[in-house]
Image (cartoon, rainbow, N blue to C red):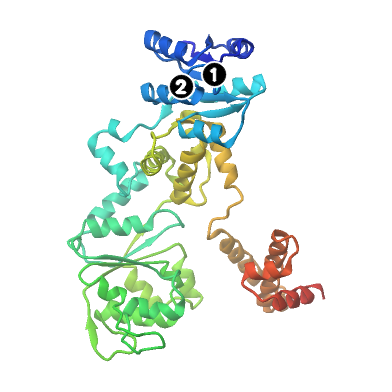
Amino acid sequence: MSVARIWVVDDDRSVRFVLATALREAGYDVDGFDSAQAALDALQARGAPALIFTDVRMPGDDGLVFLDKLKAACPQLPVIVMSAYTDIASTAGAFRGGAYEFLSKPFDLDAAVALAQRALPDAEVIGVSLHELAPDRSAQLASGALIGEAPAMRALFRSIGRLAQAPLSVLITGETGTGKELVARALHGESPRARKPFVALNTAAIPSELLESELFGHEAGAFTGASRRHLGRFEQANGGTLFLDEIGDMPAALQTRLLRVLAEGEFFRVGGRELIRVDVRVIAATHQPLEALVADGRFRADLLHRLDVVRLQLPPLRARSEDIALLAERFLAAAAAKLGGSTKRIARPALARLRQHTWPGNVRELENLCWRLAVLAPGDTISVADLDGALASSAERIAPGDWEAALAAWVRLELADAAHPATASSLHARARERLDHVLLEVALAHTHGHRGEAAARLGLGRNTVTRKLQSGRR
């Protein structure tokens, strides 16, 4: 394997000497230049090196002007900017110009060599710019289409192809962040209803008192604030597809109304007397086990049967690790298009690290990570160090369903403890007590003991917080 060439551009001879020596001892081929112009002349005569270290303040072109000229000639060339003047203008100018990293003088030589090793990973990288892809792959990555090459995803695509043509209700299940709405959009987009509306509603995101109006609409004067007629999602989706996400959170009273619409295709607006008829294909989705909700009396069995004509189970990302590279390509390309600049690539060791991650937030977590890396990773190649830093920054974030899942597991264990029925009878009170304790403890720590601010952050009155704290000490 050829030795990587590195150039050190600095008018200070001592800096050139010590940095070049350290890099040579690390196994690199190093040349030094005392000005930007000398380096530019060498660039024209000898071609680009693998990496350049450059000072900011030099005679002639300064380091930032030099950086602009380098990026114009060699956009992918990593450049590390050095300066004894670590001010906002210099650092911001360096990164705005496309610098891989900003190195403050005086610097530790081992740290500089480690930085060079990160900028020049020995391993191959994955990921290409969209214009380098075959046209069909490029269009697929650039769009919001469902993508994947894992066996589970290929089976899912076949099911979508068959189901799209059939006017059947579909229930999509899977963990949070697996892409259930993308599946619903694909079913609609490949169906005879594709030219009609696709309307989506997350039933968990709408307050229960407003959900009926959102679904079925209301007449003017139906309730306080209803100044005009409002068409609900069913009417908006007439002829097309209505996607009901998180269907397991729908209140019981609305489940009954929904069942009638599914059975008869008709309903009344809230406060209305006119019978509205619609032709809507309903696709529902949930991350919850609906059968368990039926057993608990929280979901109607007959509604489940209506929705669950065909079920599509989405695999979690950890079960389709072979798709991580493809998904990361899409997200990094989307970030580059939105933020400007070239698409970052992922070093193969970093890709291996991605495949080892458990992905509790699934594809949505990977997407968020890629956007974070697009902003924070210093070079065009994402290394393991970049990745570990980005993963560490989100290590304390909890996926939306995680704490509910932990709570549910605790409740099941407590209810199953038949040896202590008295303990089970106080379950609700004990759970509420622990919830209040944790909320207050964390909020007070966050506000450094300031009760008024903690109350405001929690949406409680100060007196309520004081009362709960006093009751918790008894």
Q: Amino acid at mark 1?
A: Met
Q: How many marks?
A: 2
Quarter holding residue 406: bottom right
Picture quadrant where residue 111 is located: top right
- Residue marked by disc 2: 66
Q: Is residue 172 above or below residue 10?
A: below
Place of residue 81 in the rendered image (x, y in percent of width and height, measured from the top left): 54, 25
Q: Position of residue 324 (x, y in %)?
A: 42, 40
Nearer-the-camera pick, 436 or 179: 436
Asked if the residue under mark 2 is in contact with the one under mark 1, i.e. CB atoms within 8 Å, the reply is: yes
Element under disc 2: helix
Q: For residue 121, say whether it is visible.
A: no
Q: Is residue 336 left or right of residue 165?
A: right
Residue under label 1 = 58
> Counting other residues with Cα less than 10 Å from the Cα at mark 2, is it few (<14), some (14-19), or many (20 or more)?
many
Q: Is residue 102 above or below residue 403?
A: above
